C-alpha cells in the first residue's frame, strides 16, 4: 500500500487524538457523572431529598416555609425518631401533611425516608429536662389563664390578634393538629421571631402541663363542621336571599 506523506500525517494525528481522548473519561459531549440522569429511587443525598419533598412547606436554609421548620433543634430533641419517620412516610391524616413513602402514595423508598429522618434527628438540640413530644389533653379552662401569662403579649388578649396576629382563627386551626400546636409552642418559630416555650417569660419556662392546657384552649376555638357551615350560610347572617 502506497501512502502519501499527507495521508500518513493525517492518520498519525487522528490516532494521537483518539489515544488522548481514550485516556480521559470525558468524551466530547459525554455528561459528567454528577450530571447524568438518575431514577428517583437512586437519590441518596439528604439535601436533594429534603429540597424536593420537604422545603416547600417547612423551609430550608434560604427560605421560610408556611409550616414549622422540621430542622428546629428543640423540636428534633423531643420528637422520637420513629415518630418522625412515620410522619414523613405516612403523613398526618386530616392535615395538609401528605405521606411521602411509596406505600402511602408518595415517591420515596423506605431507605430515602430513613435518610431524611436520620439526618434531621442528627440536628437535635443537646438539652435535658425537655417536655415530652406528646401529652394527654389539657384543661382548656386553665389554658386561658396560661395563655394570658405566656402568649397574650404577642397574640393579644383572648387570642384575637396582637402584634403577631390571631391564633384562634378557626380556618388556621383546621389546618393544624393539636400535636402541631404543641410542637410549635415547644420549639417556637425562630425564623419568624416566635420564641420557644423557654423564652415566653424570662427564667420561667412553661411546664408540659401548661403547654397541654394552652393547646386545649386553642383547640376549643376550632369550629365543628356544623358550626363552620352555619357561620357561612346565608341564614346565619339574617339574609334570606
Image (cartoon, rainbow, N blue to C red):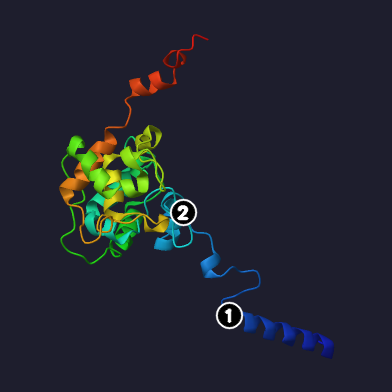
Residue at x-position 33% and y-position 53%? 113
Residue 72: x percent and y percent?
Answer: 33, 59
Q: Which residue is mark 1?
A: 24
Could you say whether the residue bearing mark 1 is in a helix, strand or loop?
A: loop
Label 2 environment density (alpha carbons within 10 Å; few <14, some 14–19, many ≥20): few
The alpha-carbon separation of the residues under discs 2 and 1 comes to: 33 Å
For residue 87, say whether it is visible: yes
Residue 190 location, quadrant: bottom left
Q: Residue furthest bottom?
A: 5
- Please give the label number shown on residue 42: none
Depicted 239 relative to depicted 108: above or below: above
Which sits in the foreground, 23 or 156? 156
Image marks 2 and 1: residues in contact by CB distance under 8 Å? no
Tell me residue 238's x, y (percent). Answer: 45, 13
Dot 2 or dot 1, earlier in sequence:
1
User: Horizontal placement of 135 versus 30: left or right?
Assistant: left
The label on residue 52 is 2
Furthest-top residue in this view = 240
Quarter that holds the N terminus: bottom right
Q: Secondary structure at mark 2?
A: helix
Residue 170 position in % (x across, y down): 37, 32
Task: Name above or below for residue 73 compared with residue 9.
Answer: above
Figure check: 90 above or below 198: above
- Answer few, some or many: residues within 10 Å of disc 1's Cα (few below 14, many 20 plus, some between 14 and 19): few
Amino acid at each position: 500500500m502506497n501512502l502519501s506523506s499527507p495521508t500518513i500525517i493525517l492518520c498519525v494525528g487522528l490516532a494521537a487524538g483518539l489515544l488522548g481522548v481514550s485516556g480521559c473519561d470525558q468524551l466530547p459531549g459525554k455528561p459528567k457523572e454528577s450530571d447524568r440522569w438518575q431514577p428517583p429511587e437512586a437519590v441518596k443525598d439528604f439535601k436533594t431529598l429534603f429540597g424536593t419533598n420537604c422545603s416547600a412547606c417547612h423551609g430550608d436554609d434560604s427560605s421560610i416555609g408556611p409550616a414549622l421548620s422540621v430542622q428546629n433543634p428543640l423540636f428534633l430533641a423531643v420528637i422520637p425518631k420513629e415518630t418522625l419517620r412515620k410522619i414523613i412516610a405516612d403523613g398526618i391524616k386530616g392535615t395538609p401533611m401528605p405521606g411521602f413513602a411509596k406505600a402511602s402514595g408518595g415517591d420515596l423508598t423506605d431507605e430515602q425516608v430513613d435518610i431524611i429522618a436520620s439526618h434531621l434527628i442528627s440536628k437535635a438540640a443537646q438539652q435535658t429536662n425537655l417536655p415530652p413530644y406528646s401529652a394527654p389533653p389539657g384543661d382548656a379552662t386553665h389554658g386561658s389563664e396560661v395563655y394570658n401569662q405566656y402568649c397574650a403579649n404577642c397574640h393579644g388578649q383572648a387570642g384575637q390578634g396582637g402584634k403577631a396576629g390571631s391564633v384562634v382563627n378557626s380556618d388556621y386551626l383546621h389546618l393544624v393538629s393539636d400535636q402541631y400546636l404543641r410542637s410549635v409552642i415547644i420549639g417556637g418559630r425562630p425564623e419568624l421571631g416566635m420564641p420557644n416555650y423557654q423564652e415566653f417569660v424570662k427564667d420561667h419556662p412553661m411546664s408540659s402541663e401548661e403547654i397541654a392546657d394552652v393547646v386545649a384552649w386553642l383547640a376549643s376555638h376550632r369550629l365543628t363542621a356544623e358550626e363552620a357551615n352555619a357561620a357561612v350560610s346565608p341564614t346565619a347572617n339574617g339574609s334570606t336571599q
